[in-house]
Amino acid sequence: MAKKTLGVAMIGYAFMGKAHSQAWRNVGIVYDIPAEIKMVAVCGRNASNTQEAADRLGWDGIETDWKKLLTRSDIDIIDICTPGDSHAEIAIAALNAGKHVICEKPLANTVAEAELMVAAANANKNVKNMVAFNYRRVPAVALAKKMISDGKLGRIFHIRARYLQDWIVDPNFPLVWRLEKDKAGSGALGDIGAHAIDTTQFVTGQKLIGVSGLTETFIKERPLPGDYSGLQASASGNKMGKVTVDDAAVFVGRTDGGALATYEATRFATGRKNDMGFEIFGSKGSLKFSFEDMNELWYFDNTEGAETAGFQRILVTEGVHPYMTAWWPPGHIIGYEHPFTHEVKDFVENIVNNTNPEPSFADGLQVQKVLDAVEKSSANNGTFQTIK
Ligand SMILES: NC(=O)c1ccc[n+]([C@@H]2O[C@H](COP(=O)([O-])OP(=O)(O)OC[C@H]3O[C@@H](n4cnc5c(N)ncnc54)[C@H](O)[C@@H]3O)[C@@H](O)[C@H]2O)c1
């Protein structure tokens, strides 16, 4: 039987746009997915730049107004790769127009926006919604989840999570949109802390029920930007602007499973480039992971005798490991771009099989509530905030 065709349109074509384009381009080559993917259109605000991006990234056409995408019958999926200030408006309109929506993280810039997005998702059950927390789809992370669900760690006592980068340590790095609250919602907290929150909640199956946090903005003013894309930028001149988000956030929390958790999110961890990682300690064993060594998961089996017990390195590249059947022979490692392919594979399967994608907008809202609670706690000198 001929496969169903799913037309995709993507809004925003820079850092995430490039990663998502690669995923849409190769998902049908790598995996035997139950649909033909057609990369119908990419949307940007400037026609010639958008056309250049379409040609480079493999999109059939362009639009310069995202609203036009919603009126087209050849588009089934809207993929939102814009900064957080446009997520809610685009996602809600797309769901109401009967399009499936995959939206980059964090889901929104505020809890109120995220609630409206969840309401739109609930009102349009005929279409699917997913928030793009891609680190869940790193095979080593998915394996960590499986090992915990299989009971290998026993009762979980501690969750230690971090997301460490260093790309704005230089005070002359310009004031890009990620440093402006009206565009990004928050700073390191929402941009990278959100990943650490989602990943550890996913892996452990436990949700944060309260937090106590501190945030800091180390560099209060920066030069206004000239050209920028993703995490690269240059200044436009000597004019300065105010940084309106946190540079770093730290918080402790309690989970609904009775664990104590600690989190750090910073762009000032000199030497750490993209260290999204965790350590999870349980009664029967523990796990540790760092994205900078993303093909590896470290496991300590506490049921083994002291003579031979020790952390073992699992190279997560075997055909039996999550997502790995379709890639390379064992030991032929994968990289940053692969989890994006896993993400769209799962999303397409959810659409065709009429199952619910995870993480959903509702999951994105729950993470948004954690971010909000950390900010409120920090504004109150670290007072513990309950998350409902
Ligand atoms: N999952 C991840 O690991 C990850 C990594 C980086 C960024 N992100 C998220 O992805 C989103 C985009 O971040 P980025 O790093 O790709 O940013 P970016 O600055 O590299 O790209 C943003 C793109 O959106 C476009 N854009 C902005 N407003 C638009 C509008 N109204 N209409 C059409 N296009 C518009 C810009 O022109 C640009 O092409 C953010 O929500 C960010 O938090 C996720």
Image: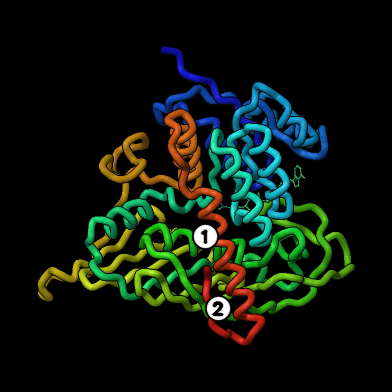
Instruction: Give whichever of 147, 205 is nearer the camera.
Output: 205
Q: In the structure shown, which secondary structural element does the residue marked by tag 2 occupy?
A: strand
Instruction: Give whichever of 378, 319 is nearer the camera.
Output: 378
The structure residue drawn at horizontal position 62% and vertical position 87%, both measured from the top left corner, is 381
The amino acid pointed to by label 1 is His
* Mark 2 crowdedness (10 Å alpha carbons): few <14, some 14-19, many ≥20: many
Q: Residue 332 falls in which quadrant of the image?
A: top left
Q: Position of residue 378 (x, y in %)?
A: 62, 80
Classify residue 340 as left or right of residue 168.
Answer: left
The structure residue drawn at horizontal position 19% and vertical position 67%, both measured from the top left corner, is 301
* Residue identifier under label 1: 195
Hey, which residue is sitting farthest front in the picture? 123
- Whether residue 82 is visible, yes or no, is yes
Q: Position of residue 119 (x, y in %)?
A: 61, 49
Kindly report which numbered mark, 1 or 2, lies closer to the viewer in this rendering. 2
* Residue identifier under label 2: 385
- Whether residue 231 is visible, yes or no, is no
**Quick one: label 1 or label 2, which is nearer the N terminus?**
1
* Mark 1 crowdedness (10 Å alpha carbons): few <14, some 14-19, many ≥20: many
Q: Is mark 1 within 8 Å of ligand 1?
A: yes
The structure residue drawn at horizontal position 73% and vertical position 65%, both measured from the top left corner, is 179
Q: Is mark 2 within 8 Å of ligand 1?
A: no
